[in-house]
Amino acid sequence: MKMRQINGKINKKVFLSHNPIDVEKNPQNEESLKKTLKKNFTEYCDNSTVHGVKYIGQRRKIQRIVWIIICIGLLCGCGTLIHTIIGKWRQNPLVFLLDQKVTPISQITFPAVTLCPQRVPNSNKFNYTNFLMRFLEDDNRNFTKKEFLLFDAVSKICHSILIKDLVELEPKLEDIPLFNNEESIEIMEEYVLTHYLKLFFCKGVLPNVTFWECNLRFTRIYLREGLCYTFNLLPKDEIFNEGVLYPLANEPNLVRPENEPSRSNFMDVVHDIGKQTEPYSVRNRRDRLHIRSRTYDDFTDEKCKPDMFIFVHNPDEIPWDRTSSAYLIDDDYYEKNLLSIEPVVVRTDNNLKYQFTYQERGCYYSDERKLKYFKSYNENNCELECITNATSQPDRLNCTFYWMPRTPDMKLCHLSQYMMGYEMQLNERLIDDIEKCECLPACNTVDYNVRVLGSHTPYFVDKGYKKEDIAKFETNEIAALWKKHMEEKLYLGMNKSYKFDIPLSEAINKTNLTVDFDIWNWRSTEIELHYEDSQFLAMRRHLAYTFADFVSQVGGILGCFLGISIFS
């Protein structure tokens, strides 16, 4: 009985002990395991589709070593190629590919068109060259505010003239008062050719309308080129943030009255085309925009000779950069200038927004970067905001140019500062400022490539008349209607207070229409804009390699060099 208890205690102690218990190894079992593994490896090598592996399973040691070296070399080669693919993907994760099908031109908006026609004051009322000579010679500076105001406005258009004499002019420029944009625009509209003659005739683009009064759709905008007019641009409150000041009119040059009898009087003279609710589109390349502009010799200057420019740009962009979207109109040599437009459309998949940073994509989504002055982001507006902020810095000019957006607390530059600023723009410092702003393109953009062609064959002949021909109008019905049309445009241009409260013919009869320039001696320039084709191929940003593309390329390399597959 005691022995059983003792044995039980001993067994319990042995069971609870943590010391390992040595077990005798069986050499026969180890040898059997090695043979089994070797047999399975040899069998795998003999039946494997991987190139060279079956030779590794052979018994000859030298052949086995050689084929092991060959297979390792091939694996290293595959690894190098795979590493190259990964590096290429990291460096260029996105690529541009053309869409698989064409898109109708009606799916995009027609570009905004901003025209800068004749914009020098009437030389019979203010001769800029003569005033400049008097200003340089007269030390008494006995000039009126209106003369200073005109000199200030025109000098900003023809700044190259002043820069030549800047050393002599600089101390005298300080005596010129600082004028705001409203004063400059008002004086220029009073002295330059009225927009009713500069924009004399328009045709096309508008739905269900053939001919239309240009000033019902063109809006005044004050650019660095001077007083210009824009068509198909978004309204001011849809471009700029609240509280931003910019010299863009809130309404077109001519607005239809809403109440009677003014509305009836208006529609007796002007064909009503309704309100514009969004930017226009066209159905095909045959739907063209025709603009006829007139120029007069009395609205020229000996030294200040600004060229006629036209900007073709997006409806949400402010045209400020002459190098990117402006085109010269040769109105001296050609009677007609044709602008052929090719849209460049880039689209980006929405899923890339969260997969890549803007640096990796090389673009911004519309809601990804907020601008101080503009509601929507695009590269053009970003650069304009960038140079505005740079110019207004205290260590720079500490002011903004008249063609820049600003807030009420920002002051405008004086004419002398404008001349200094123009010199600064030629400096590489401004280029560096734009680069620091990182104004990348928008991820979804529509740009326009434009070709300008000149022609001597206009849509219709719009010749000028001599003063002695006016008497013949009374005996020619067509000529009489033409004269009546001219008188209506002159009256509307000279009497801005007229609101169609009485019939236009009655208002003209009550007024003595006297002008100080030869209204019948003009030169006409026709501008025609159209798309090159009725369809276009858009480009799209895609992933350079999806996961499936990566697996297929890696699998192709391994399969080509070694015959490796998932099953092998």
Image (cartoon, rainbow, N blue to C red):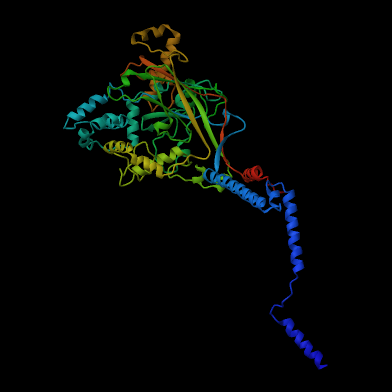
Q: Where is residue 289 in the image (x, y as percent from the top left)?
A: 49, 23
User: Which residue of the protein is positioned furthest toward the bottom in this rendering?
Assistant: 2
Q: Position of residue 181 (x, y in %)?
A: 34, 36
Q: Quick one: 71 or 365, which is closer to the camera?
A: 71
Instruction: Work out whether 285 lies above or below 381.
Output: above
Instruction: Work out whether 532 lies above or below 364.
Output: above
Instruction: Work out whether 258 lies above or below 237.
Output: above
User: Which residue of the protein is positioned furthest toward the left in this rendering?
Assistant: 139
Q: In which quarter of the image is the N terminus?
A: bottom right
Q: Quick one: 40 or 405, which is closer to the camera?
A: 40
Q: Quick one: 488 or 568, which is closer to the camera?
A: 568
Q: Quick one: 378 or 349, which is closer to the camera?
A: 349
Rendered image quadrant of residue 142: top left
Visible residue check, residue 514: no
Say which residue appears at 43% left-offset and 7% top-offset: 476
From the viewer's perspective, tell me whether residue 284 is left or right of residue 451.
right
Q: How many marks?
A: 0
Visible residue check, residue 519: yes
From the viewer's perspective, tell me whether residue 257 is left or right of residue 4.
left
Q: Position of residue 249 (x, y in %)?
A: 42, 33
Rendered image quadrant of residue 498: top left
Q: Where is residue 320 in the image (x, y as percent from the top left)?
A: 40, 34
From the viewer's perspective, tell me whether residue 78 is left or right of residue 322.
right
Rendered image quadrant of residue 455: top left
